[in-house]
Amino acid sequence: MSKNIILVDNRIKAYETIVSAVNLELCVPIIFDYSTETVETLKEKIRKQCVAPGATHIGLIQHNYGLPYYRMFAGSTVSRVFDVSSQDPTLETWSELRNFISWCKTTPEVNASYFDMMACALYSDANWKYVIDTLETQTGVTIRASTDNTGTSSLGGNWFLESQTGVNLQLFKPQYAKRRSNHRLAYFK
């Protein structure tokens, strides 16, 4: 049976609302602390949730606050978010996220086939599109993201990731839009 895990950065405004809206029959929320955790502590949290082998879908809800770089955690190395195709074409600065996504795929108890980056208009930005497409090629994991606002329709968003073949996040992620529909995920880029 497929398992779905949503990784929620605790810096997200009202992250508790997102977590409380998760349909626990379909998805397991894992909250992480950007300031104190590491990739290894996050892997351990995931391992504890994946007790039986099977395909997993991983979703990541995290802001980048408009910074010109990305860090998965405060102690992470800086990943380039501008002029990526010319300045970092092989994504050397993205090794931490690439290795994490690869770990999600190759770890038998996780066996992730999808990695969903749940953020507003991420795939509409040329740099992020390059990063996502290149990471997908490098890892063999289908990485999905949105070309428009992600979140409730009352704030101009939807729960559909348009990249690749597209996926309706309501199928496996929080029934957030139905239960507490006064939020929209902020920009990841």
Image (cartoon, rainbow, N blue to C red):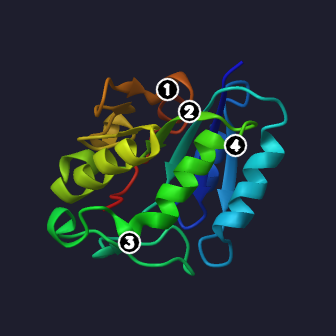
Secondary-structure class at tag 3: helix
From the image, state whether disc 4 or disc 1 is nearer to you: 4
Per the image, the residue denoted by label 2 is 173
The image quarter in which residue 140 lies: top left
Q: Residue 170 carries which label?
A: 1
Quadrant containing the C terminus is: bottom left
Name the amino acid type tagged 1.
Gln
Quadrant containing the N terminus is: top right
In the rendered view, would you say 19 is above or below 83? above
Give yes or no for contact between labels 2 and 1 (Cβ–Cβ under 8 Å). Answer: yes
Name the amino acid type tagged 4.
Thr
- Neighbour tally class for label 1: few under 14, some 14-19, many 20 plus, Cα within 10 Å: some
User: Label 3 vs label 4: CA separation?
Assistant: 23 Å
From the image, state whether disc 2 or disc 4 is nearer to you: 4
Secondary-structure class at tag 4: loop
In the rendered view, would you say 155 is above or below 80? above
Q: Which residue is drawn at 63% across and 41% down?
A: 106
Q: Residue 107 carries which label?
A: 4
In the rendered view, would you say 117 is above or below 159? below
Name the amino acid type tagged 2.
Lys
Question: Can residue 184 be seen in the rendering of this structure?
Answer: no
> Considering only order in the chain, which callout, 1 or 3, is on the residue closer to the N terminus?
3
Where residue 96 appears, x then y in whole percent? 51, 66
- Neighbour tally class for label 2: few under 14, some 14-19, many 20 plus, Cα within 10 Å: many
